[in-house]
Image (cartoon, grey):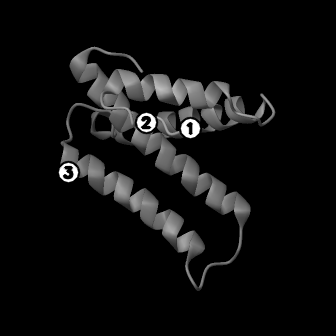
Amino acid sequence: MSRALPIDRDQLRAALRELLDGDPRQPAARPAVLAAVAAARQRHRDAHGAYAVDGHLIDHPARLTALAQELGDVACQLGPNAVEDPDMLHDELIEVAAVALAWLDHLDELDGAPF
């Protein structure tokens, strides 16, 4: 049975919560990942201040550039000359998640809706 795709932010949030609640992995896996993402976001804020992805002094094209740069780092981990290092790939994916979530939080601040 197929399910309709979420069409607004509230439906997307509900779908994500449902997916996370049904996660078959050990419960400790998710908090560790979320803690790593939170730590990466704090490092970004410490390094860039108001120019961090969730800051108020940069625009969406700059946020997209930051996200693309992080995705590029993931691509480098998977390219033909990459050394297979699951820890490095993990770290780069954490950075992607940190930038993406920071951008989402910035958007939520604009509309007053916490994720």
What amino acid type should be assigned to the residue bearing mark 1?
Answer: Val
The one of 63 and 48 positioned closer to us in this rendering: 63
Seen in the picture, residue 38 relative to 73 is either above or below; the reply is above
Between 56 and 90, the residue placed more toward the observer is 90
Q: Is residue 20 visible?
A: yes
Please give the name of the residue rendered at 71% of the width and 58% of the height, measured from the top-left corner.
Answer: 87
From this view, report whether residue 73 is shown above or below residue 8. below
Residue position for label 1: 37
Q: Mark 3 highlights which residue?
A: 61
Point out residue 93 in the picture as x, y percentages from the top left corner.
56, 53
> 10 Å neighbourhood of mark 3: few (<14), some, or many (≥20)?
few
* Numbered tag placed on residue 65 in the rendering: none
Residue identifier under label 2: 101
The image shows residue 55 at horizontal and vertical percentages of 29, 32
Name which residue lies at 27% across and 29% down. Answer: 107
Which amino acid type corresponds to the residue marked 3 in the rendered image?
Pro
- The residue positioned farthest toward the right in the image shown: 26
Q: Position of residue 4 (x, y in %)?
A: 41, 35
Instruction: For mark 2, give the secondary structure.
Output: helix
Q: Place residue 104 in its image quadrant.
A: top left
Q: Nearer the viewer, residue 78 or 19?
A: 19
Q: Quadrant of residue 89?
A: bottom right
* Label 2–label 1 contact, CB within 8 A: yes
